[in-house]
Amino acid sequence: MKTIKNDLILFLIMLTVGLIGFNIFGEQFGSKGGVVDAPASNDDRAPMVDVSNSLKAEPTDIETVSLPERQVKSMLKNRADAWNNRDLDRYMADYRKFDLLRVSVNGKTEKGWESVRESFASQFGPEMGTLRISNIKIHMVGDFASIVTADWNLQQENRITNGRMNLVMKRIDAAWKITTENLTEN
């Protein structure tokens, strides 16, 4: 029970700090934005996608972007790659596998890892589409927690949707895991 209480307190603190920081400081507060695209798979059905330049290190990135921020960006790239290769299990591996996981999509909230997975599987099925993540802003809360905001774009066979994502992430056993996700559609 103490762990649950601590996670909830950490979430509320991170959310408050993130919202205040992003509203007050805007671009100065977060990391550089960019598009995160996964390379197309060898599967002929997979659509071609652009590989992002935002994850390539520029000479100044070494000095300005911390290791945890690079790890979070790498996780987001791998996440888009998993989605674009229709690998729901690999995509779901980025969520913390626990009952307090919360994923809200346009106000509808799924609670718990299994429920989130079932929802994605039933909503998207095998044709998941092409996911792009851009305008990434990462606010580190120490070395073990982060608040991430980004834009997303999902291209499916007959539909293109886009919106904004907010993630609360925690570093657990050297891996970044999403504990809370809020997706809104434009």
Image (spheres, helix red, strand yellow):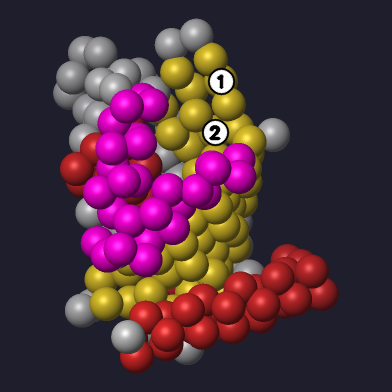
Query: What's the residue at 35%, 35% (across, down)?
Result: 120
| Secondary structure found at label 2 | strand
Q: Which residue is mark 2?
A: 153
For the residue marked with disc 1, what is the amino acid? Answer: Ile
Q: On screen, 82 above or below 40? A: below
**Which comes before the other along the chain, label 1 or label 2?**
2
Image quarter of residue 45: top left
Quarter of the image for residue 2 reads: bottom left
Q: Is residue 119 left or right of residue 15?
A: left
The quarter of the image holding the C terminus is: top right
- The residue closer to the viewer here, 25 or 159, is 159
In the rendered image, the vertical position of residue 161 relative to residue 141, given as above or below: above
Image vertical order of residue 46 relative to residue 144, above or below: above
Q: In this picture, is 96 found above or below 120?
A: below
Does residue 114 appear to the left or right of 155 in the view shown? left
Which mark is drawn over residue 160?
1
